[in-house]
Image (cartoon, rainbow, N blue to C red):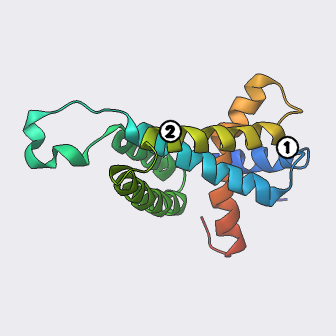
Amino acid sequence: MPPKAELRPVDKHFDEYSLVQKQFTLPVPVLCFAIVLTLFGLVTFIWALPFPYISFLGRYNGYVNWASFLIAFSIYYLLRLSPLVSYVMLFMLFAFSYGIIQLEGWQKTGGPELWLVGLVALIVGLALQLLTYRSFNFNRRLGLLLLAPLWLIVSVIKKLNFRY
């Protein structure tokens, strides 16, 4: 019998999340919505945090913010796990960035503050996810919160029959 191929880290994370998924209390579509809402809220809230003026950036100073670093770190981490997963996350974050820029425009015309929209989305998304993970202890919940976006992207990739 040939030796079993060793699983890549991305497969280990996906399998770990998929095993505990059977114990979730809310349906999977609600969980997927909660994951996307949490990620959008996190990026929006961090985008709204004030960023210091850096003189060497010159006219590009307004294009760099704390969310840029979050996006770069997450894409780098996912790229090391699986290039296709990182590309899907990058396109998802581009869509979030477009939405955030639209929210900034709405804020300038009298809409709600960007940080408030991000905070509300983050709290609602986290509340839905924590309801889903309520049968686990705190450390396990935190681990599941961190694995959730990866699980969502890999699930979509598997449904589309792509190799990741």
Image location of residue 148, percent across then percent down: 68, 46
Mark pair 2, 1: CA separation: 32 Å
* In this view, the mark in front (2 or 1): 2
| Disc 1 residue type (three-letter) | Val
Image location of residue 145, percent across then percent down: 68, 38
- Determine whether label 2 and label 1 are within 8 Å by CB: no
> Pointer 1: residues within 10 angstroms few (<14), some, or many (20+)?
few
| Disc 2 residue type (three-letter) | Leu
Using the image, tell me which numbered label, if any, was put on residue 116. Answer: 2
Quarter of the image with the C terminus is: bottom right
Residue at the extreme front of the image, as rendered: 110
Image location of residue 130, percent across then percent down: 77, 36
Residue at the extreme bottom of the image, as rendered: 161
Image check: 135 left or right of 128? right
Foreground of the two, 5 or 141: 141
Q: Secondary structure at mark 1?
A: helix
Name the residue rendered at 78%, 60% in the picture.
29
Position of residue 45 relative to residue 52, above or below, is below
Position of residue 121 relative to residue 135, above or below, is below
Q: Secondary structure at mark 2?
A: helix
Image check: 84 left or right of 153? left
Q: Quadrant of residue 144?
A: top right
Using the image, tell me which numbered label, if any, was put on residue 20. Answer: 1
Foreground of the two, 48 or 93: 48
Image location of residue 157, percent across then percent down: 64, 67
Q: Is residue 54 visible?
A: yes
Give the mark nearer the N terminus: 2 vs 1. Answer: 1
